[in-house]
DNA sequence: TCAAACTTTGCAATAGTGTTGCATCCAATT
DNA sequence: AATTGGATGCAACACTATTGCAAAGTTTGA
């Protein structure tokens, strides 16, 4: 994606657009799967773990990405859509974790249904992961 | 719970009923929240981490408990009902993770609805966690 | 233009959780 | 009693996440 577009996206979330952050944002955009810190480490070999870690943290704090917790035990991050505020239940969707290839996908079409919680339980977000075998691994 | 009852429950899942396992099972029964390894460590101070770890692993392998992955990053375990085989979607229910007190509850009433996955995606289980504030922390 | 103030990055160390190898113990079986 | 297999304890390790601090870079306002 063009540099100016990346800059805009970062600024829209009130994130200072540094070179590193634009590279990482671009990387996230190119991959439509949720990525963990180690995935960034593998690709940005010249950059320090900590920078990558803190970039993900900043992105998360500013609502640029959402966290997904799956059976891998690794915290994964996926881009939010531009309009997303990660509010419950509107912006919440399901995810698919493939037990074979270890990849996690956003099922953005699959919005979570609001549910009836017990008295006095206040929901704020959802972590919804369906485990199984993805289409690539099924064939 | 009485010793013989605990023995029965373990044998029903083809788990050798040792003293330690009965104590841990009893502990899980007494707490209706999902527990992590460290919770067991805190209580069974005279026992070794590894034994507790392997007991949970055995319980999980034999279908006595199910794993829950929430925002805490800690793998938590909760007892399955006697009839549960952890099959999708019948035995799958939602969970509630309180961001204040860090506790995770089984919402056994809240069975997950089967969903329409993309072509060739094979689901086998679900990790469904609703985050928010529990009734105890709301008041 | 320069210095002060603030932010980002890199390096090192540490914390926290989960996992394994191996020796010993124990209980069931013959 | 000897044999056998599983359970436990101890130690070490692997992997991920997190923090402190100093250096480098950037913005801001005399
Ligand atoms: Mn997602
Ligand atoms: Mn449960
Ligand atoms: Zn796959
Ligand atoms: Zn609570």
Image (cartoon, coloured by chain):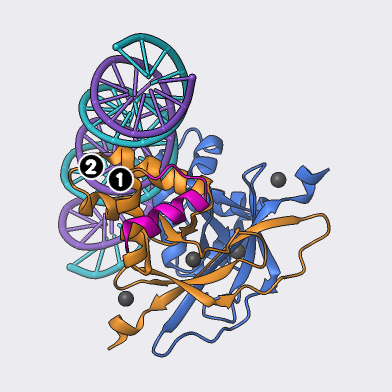
Chain colours: A blue, B orange, C purple, D cyan
Q: Residues within 10 Å of mark 1 (few under 14, many from 20)?
A: some
Is residue A75 visible in this depiction of the protein? no
Q: Are marks 1 and 2 on the same chain?
A: yes
Residue B29, percent from left and from top: 36, 64
Q: Are marks 1 and 2 in contact (CB under 8 Å)?
A: yes
Q: Is residue B2 magenta?
A: yes
Q: Report helix, strand or loop for mark 2.
A: loop
Q: Is residue B44 magenta?
A: no
Residue A39, percent from left and from top: 54, 42
1 or 2: mark nearer the eye: 1
Is residue B100 visible in this depiction of the protein? yes
Direction from residue B130 to residue B84 in the image, left or right? right
Q: Report helix, strand or loop for mark 1.
A: helix
In the image, residue A114 above or below residue A92: below
Residue B91, percent from left and from top: 61, 66
Quadrant of the displayed image that contains ligand 1: bottom right
Quote the CA–CA distance across marks 1 and 2.
9 Å
Q: Is mark 1 within 8 Å of ligand 2?
A: no
Give the chain letter at badge 2. B
In the image, residue A132 above or below residue A81: above
Is residue B107 or residue B80 the one in the foreground? B80
Which mark sits nearer the N-terminus, 1 or 2?
1
Range of the magenta residues?
B1-17
- Give the residue displayed 42% in from the left and 84% down from the top: A122
Residue, disc 2 = B47
Q: Is mark 2 within 8 Å of ligand 2?
A: no
Residue, disc 1 = B20
How many numbered discs?
A: 2
Is residue B61 or residue A133 the one in the foreground? B61
């Amino acid at each position: 994606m063009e540099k100016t577009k990346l800059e805009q996206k970062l600024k829209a979330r009130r994130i200072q657009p540094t070179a590193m952050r634009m590279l990482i944002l671009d990387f996230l955009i190119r991959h439509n799967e949720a990525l963990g810190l180690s995935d960034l480490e593998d690709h940005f070999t010249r950059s320090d773990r900590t920078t990558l870690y803190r970039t993900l943290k900043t992105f998360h704090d500013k609502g640029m990405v959402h966290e997904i917790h799956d059976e891998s035990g690794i915290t994964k991050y996926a881009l939010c859509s531009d309009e997303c505020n990660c509010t419950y239940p509107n912006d919440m969707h399901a995810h698919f974790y493939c037990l074979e290839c270890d990849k996690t996908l956003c099922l953005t079409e699959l919005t979570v249904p609001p549910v009836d919680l017990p008295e006095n339980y206040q929901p704020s977000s959802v972590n919804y992961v369906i485990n199984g075998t993805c289409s690539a691994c099924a064939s």
